Image (cartoon, grey):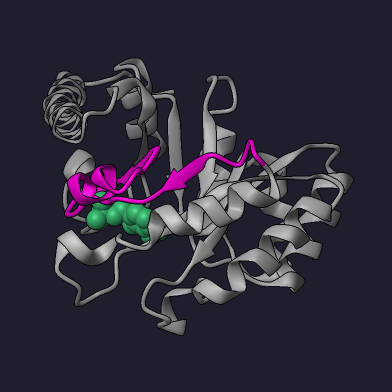
C-alpha cells in the first residue's frame, strides 16, 4: 500500500466539506418544501443518487449521516455496494432494468423503483427467492407515457401492483415517477396522489412515493413524495470523476 500523500488528504477533506455543504443545502430545501406543504420533514427520505461518482463519495456521505443511496446501472452499482458492504446502507435501484440483471440486483438492492412490466416482476421474484432476500418493489408510472424513460401508463398501475403483491419474495412498496419532460413543475406530479392511492388499495402498507430530483424536489414534496432522489445537487454535475 502506498502512503497517503498530504495532497490526497487535502482533496478528501475538500470533498468532504463540499458534500457537507451540498447536503446542508438539500436538507434545507427539503425542510422548506415540507414547511410550505404543511408536512413533517421526517416523512421525507433523502436518497443520494451516486451514479458516476466513486464509492469514496458514498462513504463520505454516509459519514455525514446519509443512509439511503441509489444507482441506475447494475454494472456500476454492484461493485459500489460491495465496496460499502460493511456500512448499514439501504440501496435503491432506480434505473431501467433488464430482466437478465435481476439476479445481480437482487443480491444488494433493498428497493427497486423501476418495476414496470410483468416479466420483470417474475424475474425479480425468482432472483429474490434465489438470494433468500425480500425485495421491496415500486411501480414506476409514466406520467407522460414516454416509453423511452420507462414506467407503465397510469391505467397499467393496478395490474403491475397486483402482480408484485402476488409474487413471493417481493413486497409492494409504493409508486415511483419522474416528472414529464415538458410539464411546468407545478403540474408535473398532479396525478401522483391518485397513483399512490391506487397502489395502496392493493396493499395498504405500500406508502412509498418516490419522486423529485435535484430540479423538482419542491414540486414532488408538494405532491406527497416520501422519497426524493437527489444526484446533481448533492454530488455535482456528472462529468465522470477521476477515480
Ligand atoms: C440520475 C437520476 C436521479 C437524480 O437526478 P438529479 O437531477 O441528478 O438529481 C433521480 N432519479 C433517477 C431515476 C435517476 O436516474
Q: Is residue 13 left or right of residue 76?
A: left
Quarter of the figure with the N terminus: top left
Residue 152 visible, this angle: no
Task: In the rendered view, tell whether residue 79 sits above or below residue 160.
Answer: above
At x 17% / y 44%, what residue is drawn? 233
Total number of numbered discs in the rendering:
0
Q: Is residue 198 left or right of residue 172?
A: left
Task: In the rendered view, tell whether residue 19 sits above or below residue 223.
Answer: above
Quarter of the figure with the C terminus: top left
Query: Horizontal and vertical percent for residue 38?
Result: 21, 29
At x 79% / y 37%, what residue is drawn? 133
Q: Is residue 216 left or right of residue 225?
A: left
Residue 69 inside the magenta-drawn segment? no
Q: Is residue 168 left or right of residue 164?
A: right
At x 17% / y 54%, what residue is drawn? 215
From which residue to which does the magenta span run? Answer: 204-231
Residue 226 visible, this angle: yes
> Which one is in front, 136 or 17?
136
Query: Horizontal and vertical percent for residue 198?
Result: 57, 56
> Which one is in front, 13 or 38?
38
Place residue 81 in its image quadrant: top right
Residue 214 inside the magenta-drawn segment? yes
Query: Horizontal and vertical percent for residue 42?
Result: 34, 20
> Which one is in front, 44 or 192?
192
Query: Horizontal and vertical percent for residue 8?
Result: 20, 26
Quadrant of the rendered image holding ligand 1: bottom left
Task: In the rendered view, tell whether residue 212 sits above or below residue 58.
Answer: below
At x 34% / y 16%, what residue is drawn? 63
Amino acid at each position: 500500500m502506498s502512503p497517503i500523500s498530504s495532497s490526497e488528504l487535502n482533496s478528501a477533506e475538500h470533498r468532504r466539506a463540499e458534500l457537507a455543504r451540498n447536503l446542508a443545502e438539500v436538507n434545507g430545501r427539503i425542510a422548506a418544501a415540507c414547511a410550505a406543504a404543511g408536512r413533517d420533514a421526517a416523512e421525507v427520505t433523502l436518497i443520494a443518487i451516486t451514479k458516476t461518482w466513486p464509492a469514496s463519495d458514498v462513504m463520505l456521505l454516509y459519514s455525514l449521516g446519509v443512509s439511503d443511496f441509489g444507482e441506475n446501472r447494475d454494472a456500476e452499482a454492484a461493485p459500489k455496494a460491495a465496496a460499502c458492504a460493511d456500512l448499514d446502507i439501504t440501496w435503491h435501484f432506480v434505473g431501467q432494468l433488464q430482466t437478465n440483471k435481476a439476479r445481480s440486483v437482487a443480491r444488494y438492492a433493498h428497493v427497486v423503483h423501476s418495476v414496470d412490466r410483468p416479466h420483470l416482476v417474475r424475474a425479480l421474484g425468482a432472483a429474490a427467492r434465489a438470494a433468500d432476500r425480500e425485495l421491496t418493489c415500486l411501480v414506476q408510472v409514466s406520467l407522460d407515457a414516454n416509453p423511452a424513460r420507462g414506467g407503465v401508463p397510469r391505467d397499467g398501475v393496478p395490474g403491475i401492483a397486483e402482480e408484485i403483491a402476488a409474487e413471493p419474495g417481493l413486497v409492494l412498496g409504493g409508486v415511483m415517477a419522474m416528472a414529464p419532460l415538458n410539464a411546468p413543475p407545478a403540474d408535473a406530479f398532479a396525478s401522483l396522489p391518485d397513483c399512490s392511492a391506487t397502489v395502496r388499495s392493493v396493499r395498504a402498507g405500500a406508502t412509498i412515493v418516490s419522486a423529485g430530483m435535484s430540479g423538482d424536489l419542491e414540486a414532488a414534496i408538494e405532491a406527497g413524495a416520501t422519497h426524493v432522489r437527489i444526484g446533481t445537487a448533492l454530488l455535482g454535475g456528472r462529468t465522470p470523476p477521476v477515480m
